[in-house]
């Protein structure tokens, strides 16, 4: 479509630094996560749709694959708005942020009881949506997790790919590794007793496995 593309040899954080260096001089509008007001407003519809589709009763647990975490932040904002409108009560789902073991700054900060996450050095995971060494909204993610008595958990690439395969076999849905990560996290949290069999749980898948065919080669 005629766009000028700059290929950056690095991670999403390196791209963000390049944008910050060039945006004023080149007259760009920065669309980076949480640098503009619109993305979180779009993401919060995740929360509205959950409430509507479940008859205005929120689930006990929401498990979300967390790179930049805008979806989790947006849902938390939506729940506050809906309560203010009188559509839902004050009870919130326990929010669970899932990250890759090879890139888990939110998990590390959660376990260390820190409000801000340090950048994860040498980040590596096959799930590109989780390959975010430093989220600008880290404190908002952590605030929502703690306020909801939720958790932040990491799973290995092998676990998430196995999760994707299992979802495909059981449900006929070809989910991305990010979706497989949520399923793997659910199994681990069930095994540890942090989620009970009687509780309602919503898992999010944020992409198609068709974008990751190289991960599923036999």
Image (cartoon, rainbow, N blue to C red):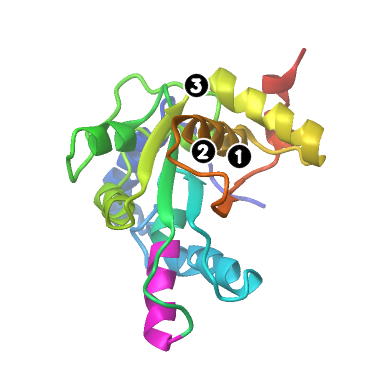
Q: In the rendered structure, which segment of residues is drawn in magenta?
A: 75-86
Q: Which residue is mark 2?
A: 129
Q: Which residue: 44% across, 71% down?
A: 78
Numbered badge on residue 35: none
In primary-sequence order, the first of circles 1 and 2 is: 2
- The answer to whether residue 93 is above or below residue 86 is above
Find disc 3 in the rendering and name its residue: 156
Q: Residues within 10 Å of mark 2 (few under 14, many from 20)?
A: many
Q: Is residue 67 visible?
A: no
Q: Find residue 125 and report its horizontal and vertical position in percent.
A: 49, 23
The label number, if any, that marks residue 179 in the structure image: 1
Residue 172: image quadrant is top right
Q: How far apart are the alpha carbons under marks 3 and 1?
A: 13 Å
Q: Residue at x 53, y 41 (%)?
A: 5
Q: Earlier in the sequence, mark 3 or mark 1?
A: 3
Residue mark closest to the camera, 3 vs 2: 3
Element carrying mark 1:
helix
Q: Nearer the viewer, residue 71 or 166?
A: 166
Vertical placement of residue 15 versus 52, above or below: above
Dot 3 surroundings within 10 Å: few (below 14), some, or many (20 or more)?
some
Dominant secondary-structure state across the stretch colored magenta: helix
């Amino acid at each position: 479509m005629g766009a000028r593309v700059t290929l950056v040899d690095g991670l999403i954080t390196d791209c963000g630094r390049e944008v910050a260096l060039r945006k004023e001089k080149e007259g760009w509008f920065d669309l980076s996560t949480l640098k503009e007001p619109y993305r979180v407003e779009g993401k919060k519809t995740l929360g509205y749709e959950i409430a509507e589709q479940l008859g205005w009763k929120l689930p006990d647990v929401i498990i979300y694959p967390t790179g930049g975490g805008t979806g989790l932040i947006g849902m938390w904002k939506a729940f506050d708005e809906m309560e203010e409108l009188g559509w839902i009560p004050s009870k919130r789902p326990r929010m669970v942020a899932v990250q890759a073991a090879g890139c888990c700054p939110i998990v590390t900060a959660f376990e260390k009881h820190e409000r801000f996450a340090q950048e994860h050095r040498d980040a590596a995971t096959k799930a590109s949506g989780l390959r975010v060494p430093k989220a600008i909204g880290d404190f908002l993610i952590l605030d929502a997790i703690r306020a909801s008595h939720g958790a932040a958990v990491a799973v290995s690439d092998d676990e998430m790919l196995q999760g994707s395969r299992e979802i495909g076999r059981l449900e006929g849905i070809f989910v991305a590794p990010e979706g497989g990560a949520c399923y793997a996290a659910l199994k681990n949290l069930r095994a540890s007793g942090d989620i009970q069999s009687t509780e309602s749980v919503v898992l999010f898948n944020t992409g198609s496995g068709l974008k990751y065919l190289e991960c599923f080669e036999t």
